[in-house]
Amino acid sequence: MELYLKISYLNDFIFCPLSIYYHQLYGELSEHLYYGKAQFDGKAAHSAVDEKRYSTHKNILQGIDVYSDEYKLCGKIDVFDVEKKLLTERKKHIEKIYDGYIFQLYAQCLCLREMGYTVKQLHFYSFDNNTVHSVTLPEANPAMFEKFKAANYAMQNFDLNSFVPENKEKCAHCIYNDFCDRPLSPKKYNGGFL
């Protein structure tokens, strides 16, 4: 049986590969144990899509499952306008478009295409300030497409036991910092540090 990884793992993997492990480890527990305000806000912003309340128009696909045999990825899209051939990923707040965001959108695009849909436009929508950020298609940005493929390959072939974190800033902002056995920043407990 082939192993398919979640599209959402791409952004997590770039942030820290250990976050995928901890999300799986603690995923069945209450999110209140490890989610911060930003994660709860993001989940709330996605609720219209997740509950398929975003649109009733027949040309709008929302929250559908997608997969790619070629890239061994699966997940859900946010919104795809079949008529406009426009794929949109909704985010609660966008300050900067990170590579991981783009990789997730590329993966969704590639999955849709492999499933027989035509995708000609990619957008991010920032819920907080009602702004749209256009992204070039994978084939229109060969350098970014190669980075996507390299990140996906690294994620698909990741060895958890040999990973050593290197970025203190990422560790300091990681929602799993309190649970991690390899943090580079001090662990936070009840507002203080150990």
Image (tube, helix red, strand yellow):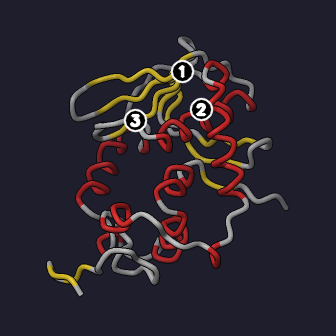
Query: Residue 12 shows which numbered tag?
Result: none
Of all residues, the one furthest to the left in this rendering is 191
Q: Mark 3 points at which residue?
A: 97
Task: Give the amino acid at mark 1.
Answer: Thr
Secondary element at tag 3: loop
Q: Residue at x 67, y 22 (%)?
A: 139
- Tell me the distance, in whole angstroms, between the alpha carbons under discs 3 and 2: 13 Å
Give neighbour class at mark 2: few <14, some 14-19, many 20+ (Cα, 10 Å): some
* Front position among marks 2 and 1: 2
Is any part of residue 8 visible from this angle? yes
Mark 3 neighbour density, 10 Å: few (under 14) some (14–19) many (20 or more): few
Looking at the image, can residue 59 be seen?
no
Amino acid type at image mark 2? Met
Mark 2 lies on a secondary structure that is helix
- Residue farthest along the right direction in this orientation: 1
Residue that sits furthest to the bottom in the current view: 194
User: For the N terminus, which image quadrant?
Assistant: bottom right
In the image, 104: left or right of 184? right
Dots 1 and 3: beta carbons under 8 Å? no
Distance Cα–Cα, label 1 vs label 3: 12 Å
Q: Distance between the residues labelled 2 and 1?
A: 10 Å
Q: Position of residue 64 (x, y in %)?
A: 57, 39
Give how far across and how far down residue 54 sits, in percent. 38, 31
Q: Which of marks 2 and 1 is nearer the N terminus?
A: 1
Quarter of the view holding residue 184: bottom left
Q: Tell me, for residue 136, which label it has, or none.
A: 1
x and y percent of residue 43 in the render? 34, 51
Question: Decide: marks 2, 1 in contact (CB < 8 A)?
Answer: yes
Query: In the displayed structure, would residue 16 be above or below residue 192?
Result: above
